[in-house]
Amino acid sequence: MKNAPNVKTLPRDKMEEAIIFAGTGAWKAAQDYQKGKGEHGDDVPPVVLDHTQLAELPHLRIVDKGRRFARVCQAGLIEQNQISMIANKLCEAGVTNAEFINEQGEKEDWTPLMKRLEDEPLMVTTRGSATPALNQMGASQRGEVLLAHYNGNLAIHADSDTVHHYNGVVWVPLSDKELQREMAQIFIDSEVAYSQNAIKSAVDTMKLGLPVMGNTARNLIGFSNGVF
């Protein structure tokens, strides 16, 4: 069983709360959350369960064993059976105190649920990909899927309007055509029919929500692998 994104970076202290964003907009929500928390010294990234992770949820570890506290925040579309599976997985990991927050900000105390699940896990019906079909999503939702494909590591250059992907070492520019081909491949892999307009609108809408890259200092000379 593999880890969901950022499980490995959870605090060593198992009494510290694990923050989990779940839904088709989880990557962006997690980035926004971390930006806000970063101002107050909290640099622990939340666990992310986006479109890709929700599709493989049965095979994912969403918190480390022995974690006691967890907060699940809905971010985008997610089905009830996925929420039930998340609750089961938290209980299996040893979580005793949990909270679920929906997109309206309404809080549900899962602590009594964690106790009940020890004796009787929730029934979960798996129906292949539990997230909505790509052709049933709006342009912004398809854009969120594309962003998740790059693990949320995209930003846009303000002057050139070119999207860049951070590969762990450098920022690599991606043309709109490259992004459209990746989006088309996601449709193909999901065995869902698509149109050129659906692909283009997903890319264009995603770009509107990307963070803007900072400007390079004038005294630095740019190279393909960095600056000098």
Image: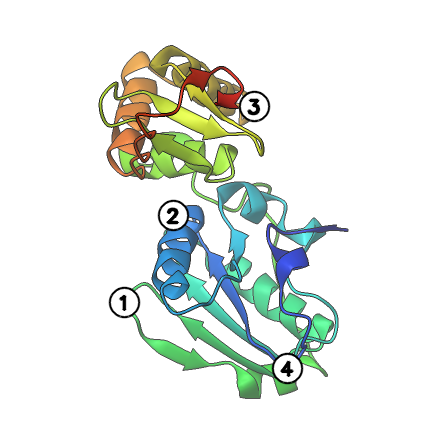
| Secondary element type, mark 4 | loop
Circle nearer the N terminus (4, 3): 4
- Indicate the amino acid at tag 2: Lys
To which quarter of the image does residue 15 belong? Answer: bottom right
Above or below, 194 relative to 129: above
- Indicate the amino acid at tag 4: Met
The answer to which of 16 and 228 lies nearer the viewer is: 228
The image's colour scheme reads rainbow
Q: CA distance from mark 2 to mark 1?
A: 17 Å
Q: CA distance from mark 1 to mark 4?
A: 27 Å
Q: Residue at x 58, y 64 (%)?
A: 86
Q: CA distance from mark 4 to mark 3?
A: 40 Å
* Residues under numbered marks 2 and 3 in contact, where contact means CB atoms less than 8 Å apart: no
Q: Which residue is mark 2?
A: 28
Q: Residue 105's x, y, as percent?
A: 30, 71
Q: Which residue is mark 1?
A: 104
Q: CA distance from mark 1 to mark 3?
A: 32 Å
Q: Residue at x 56, y 76 (%)?
A: 17
The answer to which of 4 and 225 lies nearer the viewer is: 225
* Residues under numbered marks 4 and 3 in contact, where contact means CB atoms less than 8 Å apart: no
Q: Residue 113's x, y, as percent?
A: 57, 82
